[in-house]
Image (cartoon, rainbow, N blue to C red):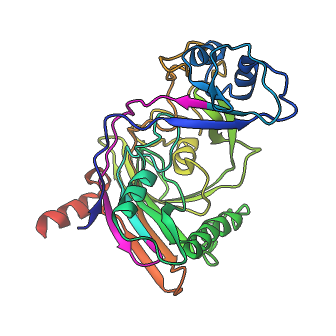
Amino acid sequence: MKTIGIAWPEFNEGLTYNDIVSPSNSGLTLIQFYSSNHTSSAPLQGWLQRIHNGQISMDGNTVTDPNTIIRVGSKLVYHRRPWIEPEAPFLLEVLYEDDDMIALNKPSGLQVLPGGLFQQRTVLTQLKWHSQKNDTPAQGQILHPAPVHRLGRGTSGVLLCAKTKHAKACLATYFADGTSLVRGKSEMNSDVGVERKITKIYRALVKGIIDNNEVLIDKPIGVMRYPGVAKGLYVALSSGKPALSKVKVLERDVEKDRTLVQVEIHSGRPHQIRIHLSLIGYPLLGDPLYVAGGQPECFDSELVEDFAEDGGYQRPTKPVPGDCGYHLHAHEVILSHPTTNEVIKIIAPLPCMLKSLEEANQEIVT
């Protein structure tokens, strides 16, 4: 088994955030600019702390007076100090690799792209570090492999990454085209995959006993305001975008009141499986966020004004999408190769919790 991964350093490298003052912001004070333009990063008092700490520079000079007037064209830089990111795994199993793409088995607990507290401890960083250890990219290759889709931090399994510009564009088109084909399919016998160049099959463990052997969930997903999630939380929403999930029951455990299912998604909305299964009354076992009806238990849209040590918002007391604990695994991806058009099947081994009794027994025998 080939793996990639380098152990995380204790501290990350910090970050810098650049702004060029526009005409509409010219004449504002420094604190007015940051407290009005970057409210999702920190409350007013948090930005004041950052300015007093010398973390803001204007045209290369540190500014500690929050009432400094800014002018059009000036370059503002916020220097976010290095911090210890939450624990995250770093080893990634390589499931498939050629000159165009690499498929990884992402472990639960590892974020795909930078966001929030995870700016270094991501799949993207490991891909970058892996590339730096190898030869300079050949002509047509991108600087380092890049994921072409996302998996939730708590979700494990197949993650496709492109190694060339052509592969990146092609795979991104596969995902986009697949989602665009979802137009209110409503019957189980509809051949919704006939035109798709990529198929994604997941394994999940849900709370409760699903009676029907197959369920087609055709419900839109949209965004609502939610504390601790700057861009809003994805939920089941009638005004949202089309989303289609095909659920197949694999095993029912009446004694433990849970069902093992296979889910094929025909669109790629964020947290789609978690939302859809909770919507029909069978949330993922251990999911701290989507517990009923495709939405969190309680919406509290008020932002907490207390700020953390670095000036940003305190970690939300309510669950957020990146919280783990649920059982969801991207088990299988079938796709047309971006260069050869050959059909490729990539399988990520199942975690123990997501194996049927028959699969577990077969493993013992072999």
Residue furthest right in the image: 24
* Quadrant assignment, res 194: bottom right
Return the x and y of residue 278 as percentages of the image width and height. 53, 42
Residue 261 seen in render:
no
Residue 168 seen in render:
yes
Highlighted range, magenta: 78-101
> Observer-nearest residue: 196 or 187?
196
Look at 44% across and 79% down and name the residue there: 344
> Observer-nearest residue: 325 or 76?
76
* Quadrant assignment, res 134: bottom left
263 displayed left or right of 218: left
> Observer-nearest residue: 134 or 198?
134
283 displayed left or right of 42: left
Residue furthest left in the image: 365
Q: Is residue 354 magenta?
A: no
Name the quarter where the N terminus is drawn. bottom left
> Compared to 91, does 321 lie above or below?
above
Name the quarter where the C terminus is drawn. bottom left
Return the x and y of residue 12 as percentages of the image width and height. 40, 37
Look at 68% across and 40% down and name the residue there: 223
Return the x and y of residue 248 as percentages of the image width and height. 47, 61
> Compared to 126, does 228 lie above or below?
above
**How many discs appear?**
0
Look at 50% across and 60% down and name the residue there: 147
Return the x and y of residue 68 as percentages of the image width and height. 74, 16
> Observer-nearest residue: 176 or 238?
176
43 displayed left or right of 311: right
